[in-house]
Image: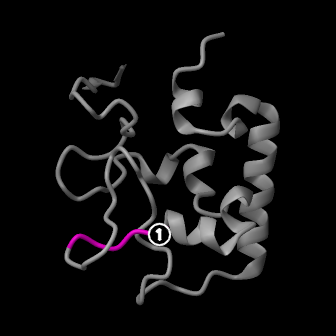
């Protein structure tokens, strides 16, 4: 994949977001204009139905002991982070609705595993 001179060819990183910076910062290179599925994450319905799904998505920063973010598994370091801001319920509901609308427009995005979506053939 090549987007604006960013090329992804590393073995084992087939589902790594191409917009992550190449350094170890795990930051988004297009954060102000990131896609809808990114701006609404982690407020997706499938992560909010069961507490276990929310906890499964949680990751800890690298300097802490526990489950860390990886390109293969993803996850969110902000979930249950001690320094995280309280997100208003209206913001969560808005993001859930936006993501639901996005999935209605692009049904393949709501079709289960990431591998199925990434390698979907039309």
Point 66% across, 10% down: residue: 122
Quadrant of residue 117 within the rendered picture: top right
Using the image as rendered, state which of residue 51 and residue 10 is in the foreground. 51
Residue 99's place in the image compared with 93, above or below, is above
The secondary structure making up most of the magenta span is loop
Using the image as rendered, state which of residue 62 and residue 86 is in the foreground. 62
Quadrant of residue 102 within the rendered picture: top right
Query: What residue occupies the far top of the structure in this picture?
Result: 122
The reply to whether residue 120 is in sight is yes
**Residue at the disc numbered 1:** 58
Point 70% across, 67% down: residue: 48
- Category of crowding for the residue at label 1, using alpha-carbon neighbours closer than 10 angstroms: few (below 14), some (14–19), many (at least 20): many
Residue 29's place in the image compared with 78, above or below, is above
Report the magenta residues as a range: 58-62
Return the x and y of residue 107 as percentages of the image width and height. 76, 31
Using the image as rendered, state which of residue 51 and residue 9 is in the foreground. 51
60 falls in the magenta region = yes
Disc 1 is placed on an element classified as loop
The reply to whether residue 106 is in sight is no
């Amino acid at each position: 994949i090549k987007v604006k001179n960013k090329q992804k060819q590393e073995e084992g990183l087939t589902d790594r977001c191409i917009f992550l910076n190449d350094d170890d910062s795990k930051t988004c290179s297009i954060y102000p204009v990131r896609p809808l599925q990114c701006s609404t994450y982690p407020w997706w319905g499938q992560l909010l139905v069961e507490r276990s799904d929310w906890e499964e998505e949680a990751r800890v920063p690298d300097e802490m002991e526990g489950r860390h973010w990886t390109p293969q598994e993803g996850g969110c370091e902000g979930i249950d982070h001690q320094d995280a801001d309280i997100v208003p319920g209206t913001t969560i509901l808005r993001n859930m609705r936006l993501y639901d609308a996005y999935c209605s427009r692009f049904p393949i995005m709501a079709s289960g595993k990431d591998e199925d979506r990434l390698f979907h053939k039309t």
